[in-house]
Amino acid sequence: MAELRAELAKDLDEAAWEWLIPHVKRDSVLVVAKELNLVEVGIAIASDNLTSVQHWISEQLIQKPSQTQLSDWNSDLQKRFNTLIVQPYVLIQEP
């Protein structure tokens, strides 16, 4: 688990919204709430920790972008997000 944590922490990045649009079109973007640690969410997804992931989904702490979010973000293509790729998903979080 420590190796996975180190690898994911190394893969944390920042991306402009316009770079994320192709991933949205593939329906692979998940929005992670600010109160969650992006690396911890990535670890849970990568290790198939269904209990944690289902809890976060039920609490709406992880979700697909809403139409309102998409509309807002499409009006600011340079908006920045913290990102983490955990195949097949791209996790994004507003800084």
Image (spheres, rainbow, N blue to C red):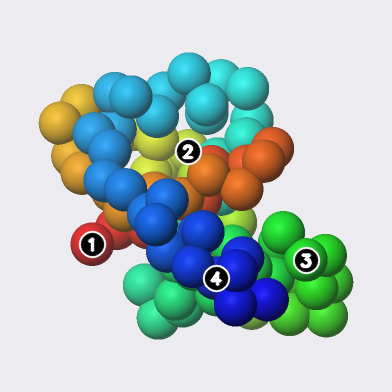
Depth-wise, is mark 1 or mark 2 nearer the camera?
Answer: 1
Measure the alpha-carbon separation of dots 3 and 2.
29 Å
The residue lying toward the viewer, choosing from 38 and 73, is 38
Residue wearing tag 4: 5
SS class, disc 3: loop
Where residue 65 sits: x, y (%)?
Answer: 50, 45
Where residue 83 sits: x, y (%)?
Answer: 39, 49
Whether label 3 touches label 1, CB < 8 Å: no
Residue wearing tag 3: 47
- Amino acid carrying label 1: it is Pro
Depth-wise, is mark 3 or mark 1 nearer the camera?
Answer: 3
- Amino acid carrying label 4: it is Arg
Q: Is 10 on the left-hand or right-hand side of 6?
A: left
Label 3 or label 2, whichever comes before in sequence order: 3
Q: Which mark is residue 52?
A: none
Label 1 or label 2, whichever comes before in sequence order: 2
Depth-wise, is mark 3 or mark 4 nearer the camera?
Answer: 4
Residue at x-position 82% and y-position 65%: 48
Occupied quadrant, residue 35: bottom left
User: Is 27 rendered above or below residue 11?
Assistant: above
Where residue 43 sits: x, y (%)?
Answer: 64, 68
On the rendered image, what quadrant is the C terminus found in? bottom left
Measure the alpha-carbon separation of dots 3 and 1.
25 Å
On the rendered image, what quadrant is the N terminus found in? bottom right
Measure the alpha-carbon separation of dots 1 and 2.
20 Å
Residue at x-position 69% and y-position 70%: 44
Label 3 or label 4, whichever comes before in sequence order: 4
Measure the alpha-carbon separation of dots 3 and 4.
11 Å
Residue wearing tag 2: 67
Residue wearing tag 1: 95
User: Is 40 rendered above or below residue 30?
Assistant: below
Depth-wise, is mark 3 or mark 2 nearer the camera?
Answer: 3
